[in-house]
Image: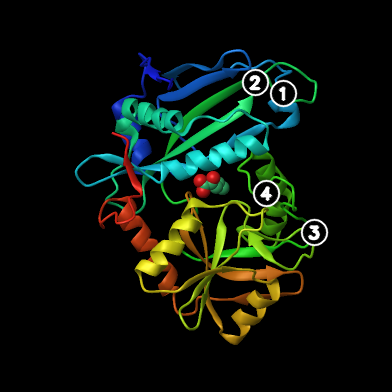
């Protein structure tokens, strides 16, 4: 039987003027709506106690397994307001399926896709006034479903009690510079993931492991890190929080093929289809770091861009490493911007949803 996320509305929501001020300049990940969705899983009962309650602290024992062994997964999605006021999300079944794959890898219980989608609908229904108008830029309500081992137990085994939660945060562009090109540091000291590891799962541990490299990037004046494969340190994988695409001189776009250690991005996958809609050929294949460096130098690679739910499509300008750098995008990244516009037009209901990617939330 499917879960029912019954709403318990809070009596003290954020005042309307304060909410309006937040929506006028939301930033990314700083402000949260009035409510959150939650459900509990126990070995005996399975999923139960689904509800939408006031956003606020979660009580955990200091011995909660997630705090020690990082048994945790999450998703990133957005709710978009269309011109008629209706609210939609993008390919939620793809995120639900990835959440299940991540759960299997982290030995967490799978949440049925229907319950996943219902939790988003229930939360967004109660907090609809927090979904910004989509007219200006790329404002949306960022949705963050996550699941963690809440059992108070220090033995190393899959937790017998797990908490599922969805929080929501009004969001503008992920990068301060908006669509201005970002610079990338090539990490040679760190690897994000290895074959057989958790690279394809969306688990907090992967992001924790990327932070030291992210600090190194900042020390070199870069905004993001590019990771190479863990075995040969040759093949371009991803940026830790975003996938990568390369645009060739002949218009072809290429993204690193899924290796088991790359996150299977929903935006990455959608761009493969959007490219075809735009008459561009799109390929998934291995791309070496030398392909990137030499291609940028020779002009064979004209643009590089990052993509993800949070980042949408963001051009990459400079790739720097210990001893050198190359830049792409001298022409102003027209292909990246065209793909970005096509994606946003579908998400905001300005273009026909020919792939059936949108689901109405409210
Ligand atoms: C997303 O794009 O939604 C992510 O989860 C990536 C994170 C770096 C914000």
Quadrant where the C terminus sits is: top left
Give the CA separation, mark 3 to mark 2. Answer: 34 Å
Q: Residues within 10 Å of mark 3 (few under 14, many from 20)?
A: few
Q: Earlier in the sequence, mark 1 or mark 3?
A: 1
Look at the picture and state if 320 lies above or below 126: below
The color scheme shown is rainbow
Q: Earlier in the sequence, mark 2 or mark 1?
A: 1
Residue 102, position as x, y percentages in the image: 61, 39
Q: State which mark lies toward you, 1 or 3.
A: 1
Give the CA separation, mark 2 to mark 1. Answer: 6 Å
Q: Residue at x 25, y 56 (%)?
A: 352
Residue 251 shows in this picture: yes
Residue 162, position as x, y percentages in the image: 61, 22
* Residue 65 placement, left or right of 116: right
Residue at the bottom extreme, as displayed: 298
Disc 4 designates what residue?
A: 199
Residue 5, position as x, y percentages in the image: 40, 20
Q: State which mark lies toward you, 3 or 2.
A: 2
Disc 2 designates what residue?
A: 150
Front residue of this view, candidates 49 and 334 = 49
Residue 6, position as x, y percentages in the image: 38, 17
Look at the picture and state if 132 lies above or below 138: above
Disc 3 designates what residue?
A: 189
Q: Secondary structure at mark 3?
A: loop
Disc 1 designates what residue?
A: 65
Quadrant where the N terminus sits is: top left
């Amino acid at each position: 039987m499917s879960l029912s996320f019954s709403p318990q509305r809070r009596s003290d929501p954020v005042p309307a003027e304060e909410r309006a001020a937040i929506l006028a300049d939301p930033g990314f990940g700083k402000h949260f709506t009035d409510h959150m969705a939650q459900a509990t899983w126990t070995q005996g009962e399975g999923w139960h106690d689904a509800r939408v309650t006031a956003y606020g602290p979660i009580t955990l024992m200091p011995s909660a397994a997630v705090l020690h062994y990082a048994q945790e997964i999450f998703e990133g999605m957005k709710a978009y307001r269309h011109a008629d006021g209706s609210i939609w999300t993008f390919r939620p079944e793809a995120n639900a399926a990835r959440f299940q794959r991540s759960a299997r890898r982290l030995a967490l219980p799978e949440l049925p896709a229907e319950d996943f989608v219902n939790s988003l609908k229930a939360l967004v229904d109660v907090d609809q006034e927090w979904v910004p108008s989509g007219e200006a830029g790329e404002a949306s309500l960022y949705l963050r479903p996550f699941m963690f081992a809440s059992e108070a137990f220090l033995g190393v085994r899959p937790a017998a009690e797990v908490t599922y939660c969805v929080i929501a945060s009004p969001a503008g562009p992920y990068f301060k510079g908006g669509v201005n090109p970002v610079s990338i540091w090539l990490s040679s000291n760190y690897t994000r993931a290895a074959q057989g590891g958790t690279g394809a799962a969306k688990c907090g541990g992967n992001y924790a492991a990327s932070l030291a490299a992210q600090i190194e990037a900042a020390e070199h004046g870069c905004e993001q890190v590019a990771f190479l494969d863990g075995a040969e340190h040759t093949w371009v994988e991803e940026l830790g929080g975003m996938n990568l695409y390369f645009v060739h001189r002949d218009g072809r776009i290429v993204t690193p093929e899924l290796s088991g250690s790359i996150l299977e991005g929903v935006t990455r996958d959608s761009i493969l289809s959007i490219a075809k809609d735009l008459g561009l050929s799109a390929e998934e294949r291995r791309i070496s770091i030398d392909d990137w460096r030499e291609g940028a130098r020779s002009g064979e690679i004209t643009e590089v861009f990052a993509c993800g739910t949070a980042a949408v499509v963001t051009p990459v300008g400079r790739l720097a490493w210990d001893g050198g750098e190359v830049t792409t995008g001298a022409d102003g990244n027209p292909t990246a911007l065209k793909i970005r516009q096509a994606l946003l037009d579908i998400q905001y209901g300005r273009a026909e949803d020919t792939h059936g990617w949108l689901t109405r939330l409210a």
